[in-house]
Image (cartoon, rainbow, N blue to C red):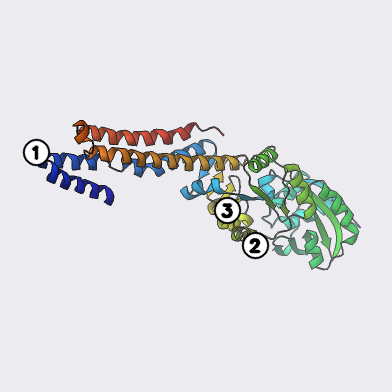
Amino acid sequence: MPSVVGVSFLTFLLWLILGGDGALGYAFVTSMTVLVIACPCALGLATPISVMVAVGRAAQSGILIRKGEALQTAGKLNCIILDKTGTVTQGKPTVAKVLAFGDFDETTVLQLAASLESGSEHPLASSILAAAKEQDLKLDRIKQFKAVAGRGVMGLWQGKPVLFGNKTLMLEEQVAVAGYLPALKELSELGQTPMLLAVNAEIVGIVSVSDPIKTDSAEAVQALKNLGVRLIMVTGDNDITANAIAKQAGITEVKAQVLPEYKAAIVSELQRTGYCVGMVGDGINDAPALAQADVGMAIGGGTDVAIESADIVILQGSLLKVPEAMKLSSATLVNIKQNLLGAFFYNTISIPLAAGLFYPIFGVLLNPMIAGLAMAMSSVTVVSNANRLRWMKF
């Protein structure tokens, strides 16, 4: 703006000094023509119109862009962290197997596990409660209930201490698990999540939950690899189960048995090493990592906390929308640069013409009305170019 005003003032002075007869008239016409033709409408539109059109195109595809900065950053991502449950997998776990030991039978094991999980908000709890409901099992009252993040739950049942969770919880509470490791390994290798049930510090059962991967997870993973993105699956599940799920999806890098508070730390560490990091998740545990990432993407069916922490919301829950968002981001940046370059090029050519630089050669001055039309057409060009994003194919 200061440059254009300066050029206009300089044009006025030069014509006033060198214009000869009618110099004042020429000075006014040329200086005003410079201001009219260089009106920065196109420059002002170059970025916001592209972003606006891209946000609309994303919404049509089931991608909600909550922050404009995320749209411009997504195309630069070179490392993406994927949560497992509800992100790579369907997020609708079901009880696959119930094993009972000692004096307990399978029905009692499921009943007690469901009684404990009735106070939990963990995604796997819903599958156990659903299985108990299908069998019309009456839940017992659990006293002194306590949830241990990343491990399981505990409480008092009929005056006896009960534990339900992973191997780590049992070892921390000094419950012997050595004799049950083969069963845990066998279930984990099937891609299931086995949980141990202990009463009075003795294992009485195992409840294994299965959560199959989404039908398009493997395709989405391959699409991200084609974009040159480093993929890491981060989960609180055990190593064997996590690697079994990752293998089905085509993910080679896995961090398992990660406590919720450490997910954000993993994002921070990757950022410190120079990666532009995206995080995709759906649970309460993913919220800190979603907020820490350069671009946080929440699965639309996830928790409200995760959605509020994210920059982009994938409404349909499909991982294929992640590479789509990245491609749209890259296309938007290219479109913005085209708009800016076009606007600058237009001003570079038009300002000397409006100032009357070619008058000594051709004897013609640019009419201010023509300058006004040319200025308007530059804005039309920018808007038209931005609207090409509406028809972008993924």
How many C-alpha atoms fall within 10 Å of the one at disc 3: few (<14), some, or many (≥20)? Answer: many
Residue 263 position, x and y percent, is 65, 58
| Mark 1 lies on residue | 22
Residue 139 position, x and y percent, is 75, 54
Residue 142 position, x and y percent, is 74, 61
| Mark 2 lies on residue | 261
Real-space CA distance between mark 1 and mark 3, rounded to the nearest whole angstrom: 61 Å
| Earlier residue among tags 1 and 2 | 1
| Circles 3 and 2 in contact, beta carbons < 8 Å | no
**Which image quadrant is residue 301 in?**
top right
| Mark 3 lies on residue | 276
Q: Secondary structure at mark 3?
A: loop
How many C-alpha atoms fall within 10 Å of the one at disc 2: few (<14), some, or many (≥20)? Answer: some
Q: Amino acid at mark 2?
A: Glu
Real-space CA distance between mark 1 and mark 2, rounded to the nearest whole angstrom: 77 Å
Horizontal placement of 80 versus 251: left or right? Answer: left
Marker count (numbered):
3
Q: Amino acid at mark 1?
A: Gly
Q: Residue at x 63, y 45 (%)?
A: 228
Q: Amino acid at mark 3?
A: Cys
**Which image quadrant is residue 203 in?**
bottom right
Horizontal placement of 93 versus 320: left or right? Answer: right
Q: Nearer the viewer, mark 1 or mark 2?
A: 1
How many C-alpha atoms fall within 10 Å of the one at disc 1: few (<14), some, or many (≥20)? Answer: few
Q: Secondary structure at mark 2?
A: helix
Residue 14 position, x and y percent, is 17, 46
Real-space CA distance between mark 3 and mark 2, rounded to the nearest whole angstrom: 20 Å
Q: Nearer the viewer, mark 3 or mark 2?
A: 3
Q: Nearer the viewer, mark 1 or mark 3?
A: 1
Residue nearer the viewer, 78 or 150: 78
